[in-house]
Amino acid sequence: MRRVLNLASPDRSTRRNRALGATLAFVVSATNAGGYLAVGQYTSHMTGIVSTLPDDIALGRARPALAAVGALLAFTLGAMTTAITVNWARRRELRSRFAIPLLLEALLLLLFGLFGGVLGGYTSLAVPMTVLLLCYLMGLQNAVITKISSAEIRTTHVTGLITDVGLELGRLVYVNRAELPETVRANRERLGVHSLLLGAFLAGGLAGALGFTAVGNVAVLPLAGLLLLVGLKPVATDLGEAL
């Protein structure tokens, strides 16, 4: 429990970054998978959204094009929110600089879990609002781990992870010829980190899909609770010092 409470601490280490990355990968994947079941769209997949936007424009499909633009803007706004809050807190030397956006994400997930069912009766409003909310959360969270790890870890997409795993596996199975001076060696540590993140993403997606299938939107409440655990201690410390 102590390790979870310290994951958002400003005192960073490689081990702590990996643990937080795996935790956030699980949360974002569960939310993404559950969101797909709720609205029929993956909200972390900005590559796909950007790819479909030109097609929609070329084919004269105004509504899907506007929806794609809205999703991109929401994701961008989420990342901007993280940048603003982290830099604001850092300039004031707050320990909660990384915890604040995570607590904001937890709060929005709580609202979605508790009141998402109420919006379900207003389909024309619920679907676009849910997509925008989830895209905002994806941008918010991805920016948090990007800033914490100096852009070494991202949690909302796995294309880069699988590419890096493939590269390291290729180096791992490469047969070095003894007469050649250059030796090919896999970075086993890097392979382990990316495999951990990929495994967390897969586990989160499975948990999210099963949870939404069983209980609907309230499946995000444990995810919100996990984020609250991660972010609460630094915020409480700052509040205690201020008082």
Image: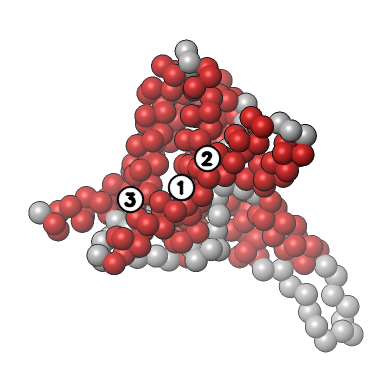
Which amino acid type corresponds to the residue marked 3 in the rendered image? Ile
Q: Which residue is mark 1?
A: 78
> Disc 1 vs disc 2: Cβ atoms closer than 8 Å?
yes
Picture coordinates of residue 129 (x, y %)?
Answer: 48, 29
For marks 3 and 1, give the CA distance: 13 Å
> Residue 126: where, in percent of width, then height?
49, 22
Is 174 left, or right, of 165 in this rendering? Answer: right
Residue at the left extreme?
243
Mark pair 2, 3: CA separation? 18 Å
Q: In the image, what residue occupies the spot 55% across and 63% down?
A: 152
Secondary structure under the numbered disc 2 in the rendered image: helix
- Disc 1 residue type? Gly
Q: Earlier in the sequence, mark 3 or mark 1?
A: 1
Q: Return the mark for residue 96.
A: none
Q: Closer to the camera, 53 or 186?
A: 53
Q: Residues within 10 Å of mark 2 (few under 14, many from 20)?
A: many
The amino acid beneath tag 2 is Cys
Q: What label sits on residue 135 in the rendered view? A: 2
Q: Is residue 96 above or below residue 177?
A: above
> Where is residue 98 drawn, in percent x and y?
36, 56
Residue 8's image quarter?
Answer: bottom left
What numbered label is drawn on residue 100? 3
Residue 48 in sight from this viewpoint: no
Quadrant of the frame with the C terminus: bottom left
For label 3, the SS is helix
Question: Where 170 sits versus 140, above or below?
Answer: below
Label 3 Cα neighbours within 10 Å, binned few <14 / some 14-19 / many ≥20: many
Instruction: Report if residue 94 is visible in the image.
Output: yes
Is mark 3 in CB contact (under 8 Å) with mark 1?
Answer: no
